Image: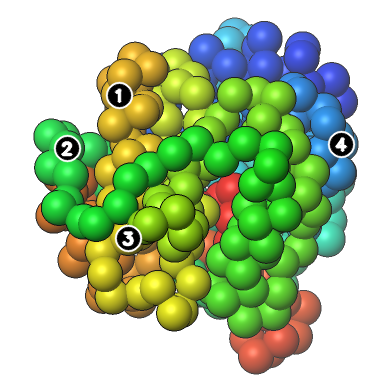
């Protein structure tokens, strides 16, 4: 096996895109992250680490990428490609802080990484990927609309609040740039309103490879307990279906019983469990905190 590191997102995607798109469910995060890298308009998405792994015939058999400070996305690395990928990451990104992906893939890479580096690994976040089977919208007061540029400040505020609440350490990326990039890409923020008052948010993307993922689902504390997040999620999901998505996905935090209860009511069913594993040079207590947002 031979691993190659790439510096041009367009050339990398031309090479690795078919590999990721062959399984857009497993590689959902890699696909949406690469879309932002290809757009090249957001800080943090302009200089990703991108690598491919090739067998002895030269055929591409694995691919991975990382946009620091986010974890390395390893869903596109079969087990046999991990040793070569570890070698490449050690050379080009020795300060790697975490990996994320389907549980078996993340555990395989983490084991190889810690054996090579002597670092400590610690599971920081367990999630579950859900796929929409048949949408069942809830009966909730209010209606959805797509947020526009007049909503910029609200959307930025709520995306920042989403990250702050889930991390406990604050957001780490420029959410204003993220919202503006979404406007340019046509990726909609669905705002649920009741009597003209915005009460909840859900974001999704224009389908890529037939796949769309719902994320940034957020309701301010004072508006919770009324089903608004479910309604906003259903609106975003319906939009994705109308746009031609054949796979509508979302992640939940396995530690949050509420989301793992409400999304199945909308018609979402589990696909696989994923995990983020952090690395530390010292004890497990020194491992980096997990990060949320696009990688959910």
In this image, 129 relative to 15: left or right?
A: left
Q: Is residue 169 above or below residue 218?
A: below
Residue 133 in sight here: yes
Residue corresponding to mark 3: 228
* Nearer mark to the viewer, of 1 and 4: 1
Residue 241's label in the rendered image is 1
Residue at 70% over, 47% down: 152
Q: Secondary structure at mark 3?
A: helix
Q: What is the residue that sits farthest to the front in this orientation? A: 195
Q: Are marks 3 and 1 in contact (CB under 8 Å)?
A: no
Tell me how far mark 2 sits from mark 4, CA to CA: 38 Å
* Nearer mark to the viewer, of 4 and 3: 3
Residue at 49% over, 72% down: 220
Tell me how far mark 1 sits from mark 4, CA to CA: 32 Å
Residue at 38% over, 38% down: 236
Q: Position of residue 226 (x, y in %)?
A: 26, 69
Dot 1, how many residues are within 10 Å of its Cα: few (below 14), some (14-19), or many (20+)? some
* Nearer mark to the viewer, of 3 and 1: 3
Q: Position of residue 149 (x, y in %)?
A: 70, 37
Residue corresponding to mark 2: 135
Residue 129 in sight here: no
The front one of 116 and 35 is: 35
Indicate how the structure is coloured in the image. rainbow
Q: Secondary structure at mark 4?
A: loop
N-term mark: 4 or 3: 4
Residue 47's label in the rendered image is 4
In this image, 224 relative to 35: left or right?
A: left
N-term mark: 3 or 1: 3
Tell me how far mark 2 sits from mark 1, CA to CA: 9 Å
Q: Position of residue 28 (x, y in %)?
A: 46, 35
């Amino acid at each position: 096996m031979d691993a190659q590191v790439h510096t041009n997102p367009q050339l990398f995607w031309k090479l690795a895109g078919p590999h990721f798109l062959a399984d857009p469910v497993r590689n959902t995060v890699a696909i949406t992250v690469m879309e932002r890298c290809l757009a090249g308009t957001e800080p943090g998405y302009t200089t990703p680490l991108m690598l491919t792994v090739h067998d002895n015939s030269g055929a591409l058999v694995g691919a991975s990428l990382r946009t620091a400070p986010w974890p390395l996305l390893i869903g596109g690395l079969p087990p046999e490609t991990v040793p070569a990928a570890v070698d490449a990451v050690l050379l080009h990104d020795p300060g790697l802080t975490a990996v994320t992906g389907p549980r078996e893939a993340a555990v395989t890479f983490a084991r190889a990484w810690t054996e090579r580096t002597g670092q400590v690994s610690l599971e920081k976040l367990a999630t579950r990927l859900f796929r929409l089977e048949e949408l069942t919208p809830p009966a909730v007061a209010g209606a959805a609309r797509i947020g526009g540029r007049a909503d910029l400040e609200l959307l930025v505020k709520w995306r920042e609040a989403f990250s702050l609440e889930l991390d406990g350490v604050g957001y780490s990326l420029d959410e204003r740039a993220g919202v503006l990039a979404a406007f340019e890409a046509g990726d909609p923020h669905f705002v649920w309103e009741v009597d003209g008052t915005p009460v909840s948010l859900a974001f999704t993307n224009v389908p890529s490879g037939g796949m769309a993922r719902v994320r940034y689902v957020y309701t301010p504390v004072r508006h919770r307990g009324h089903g608004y997040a479910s309604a906003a999620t259903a609106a975003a999901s319906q939009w994705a279906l109308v746009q031609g998505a054949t796979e509508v996905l979302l992640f939940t935090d396995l530690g949050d019983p509420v989301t793992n209860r409400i999304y199945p009511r909308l018609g979402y069913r589990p696909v696989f469990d994923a995990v983020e594993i952090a690395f530390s040079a010292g004890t497990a207590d020194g491992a980096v905190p997990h990060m949320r947002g696009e990688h959910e």
